[in-house]
Image (cartoon, helix red, strand yellow):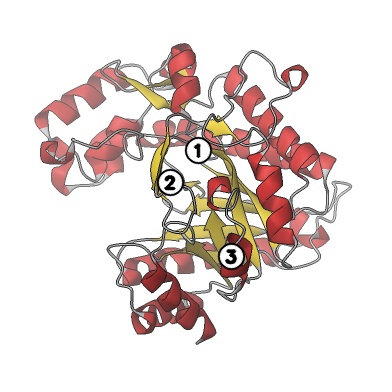
């Protein structure tokens, strides 16, 4: 299946948008229901060319009685029901509409509730990163999932940033490259030491991390080596946060809408922090695992192959012989699938042959779904190249 990613404002107010997207040859649209701040090009819209999305927002009506202490913001740049308007227009041309749900990446809520946001070893606040170690964050994500399934009634649920965020993937103009905090250093700067996380690590971990970062020691080694004998314990803390959040949300989704497919933006790297949450051990109860394919195609393909191997383990899991309930894999009507999150924007060229070759590479690595980013931001030349690549 081919899935085009869109924002609600790409469709609302533009009657030509649904037909243009359907003409790409996709079967479905991943439509943002909850999204972070951005500055977006709108090259096709009849009323504007650039849209400033000032803060993270929820694109369904905010029903106050549905929320707890953490309440998302409504947009001022679109109507409050923009998702519903866009959904109906897209479904009218035969497209399925999946709810693209951004979870812990929320600068509005992180700024409003700084006690619930990530803090690095130096105490610096990452306002864009809600920390899932806090029960209030779990509660917010659960309520967000419930509202989307109840009000939006999507054809599928896509969970992005379903775990701890980190040093990268922020919401401001990035001015940190010159510090050379790459690789393991970036991983260490992604570790959260908020009041809920810090006590979970081995004693002295904060001081160890600060010392390693300031001496740039792990520039040629691995994150695990940089953390030394603390590595396993720290990794287990991080993975447990992702696992707890993910399984709570899947449980909510299965309770409300058992037949709605669930897609996870996932990364097999156990130290991953960001939109593609760490998933080294898999998630049998998800329907699709999507890997990021924005970098070197060979490295991207390797990542997809690892996810495919994880999915194969889920698909071949035996039904327990004890009185325990059957495994999710045994109950799933179709095998767990792999999706490739394909970049059709710069630095990728607007070249159908290049795009088609990359898609073929990802398919050989195990991808059976192409998640195409981004049909609203791409120029006419890029959309034309994307259409031709899909047809090939």
Which of the two discs, 1 and 3, labels the residue nearer the N terminus?
Answer: 3
C-beta proximity under 8 Å, tags 1 and 2: yes
Q: Which residue is mark 1?
A: 239
Q: Is residue 286 visible?
A: no
Q: Nearer the viewer, mark 1 or mark 3?
A: 3
Q: Which mark is residue 270?
A: 2
Dot 3 falls on a residue whose secondary structure is strand
Which of the two discs, 2 and 3, labels the residue nearer the N terminus?
Answer: 3
Q: Which residue occupies the foreground of this view, 128 or 13?
A: 13
Which of the two discs, 1 and 2, labels the residue nearer the N terminus?
Answer: 1
| Left or right: 151 as drawn, with respect to 180 | right
Q: Which residue occupies the foreground of this view, 48 or 107?
A: 48
| Left or right: 181 as drawn, with respect to 368 | left
Q: Position of residue 235 (x, y in %)?
A: 42, 36
Residue at 67% across / 64% down in the picture? Answer: 336
Q: For marks 1 and 2, give the CA distance.
A: 7 Å
Q: Which residue is mark 3?
A: 3
Dot 1 falls on a residue whose secondary structure is helix
């Amino acid at each position: 299946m081919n899935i085009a990613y869109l924002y609600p404002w790409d469709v609302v107010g533009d009657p030509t948008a649904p037909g243009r997207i359907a003409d790409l040859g996709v079967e479905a649209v991943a439509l943002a229901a909850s999204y972070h701040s951005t500055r977006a090009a709108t090259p096709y819209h009849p009323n504007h060319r650039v849209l400033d999305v000032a803060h993270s927002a929820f694109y369904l009506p905010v029903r106050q009685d549905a929320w707890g202490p953490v309440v998302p913001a409504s947009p001022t740049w679109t109507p409050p029901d923009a998702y519903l308007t866009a959904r109906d227009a897209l479904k009218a041309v035969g497209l399925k509409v999946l709810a693209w749900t951004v979870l812990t990446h929320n600068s509005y809520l992180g700024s409003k509730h700084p006690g619930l946001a990530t803090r690095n070893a130096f105490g610096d606040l990452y306002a864009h990163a809600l920390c899932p170690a806090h029960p209030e964050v779990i509660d917010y994500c659960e309520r967000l999932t419930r509202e989307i399934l109840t009000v939006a009634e999507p054809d599928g649920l896509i969970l992005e940033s379903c775990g701890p965020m980190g040093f990268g993937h922020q919401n401001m103009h990035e001015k940190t490259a010159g510090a050379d905090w790459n690789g393991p250093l970036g991983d260490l700067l992604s570790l959260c030491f908020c009041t809920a996380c810090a006590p979970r690590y081995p004693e002295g971990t904060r001081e160890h991390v600060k010392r390693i970062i300031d001496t740039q020691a792990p520039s040629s080694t691995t994150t695990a080596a940089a953390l030394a004998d603390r590595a396993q314990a720290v990794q287990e803390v991080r993975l447990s946060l992702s696992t707890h959040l993910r399984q709570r949300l899947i449980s909510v989704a299965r309770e409300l809408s058992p037949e709605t497919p669930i897609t996870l933006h996932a990364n097999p790297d156990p130290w991953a922090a960001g939109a593609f949450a760490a998933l080294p051990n898999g998630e049998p109860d998800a329907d699709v695992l999507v890997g990021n394919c924005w970098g070197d195609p060979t490295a991207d393909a390797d990542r997809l192959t690892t996810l495919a191997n994880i999915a194969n383990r889920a698909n071949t899991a035996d039904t327990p012989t004890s009185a325990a309930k059957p495994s999710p894999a045994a109950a799933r009507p179709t095998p767990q699938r792999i999706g490739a999150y394909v970049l059709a924007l710069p630095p990728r060229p607007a070249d159908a042959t290049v795009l088609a070759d990359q898609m073929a590479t990802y398919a050989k690595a195990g991808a059976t779904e192409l998640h195409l980013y981004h049909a609203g931001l791409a120029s006419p030349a890029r959309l034309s190249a994307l259409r031709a690549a899909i047809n090939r």
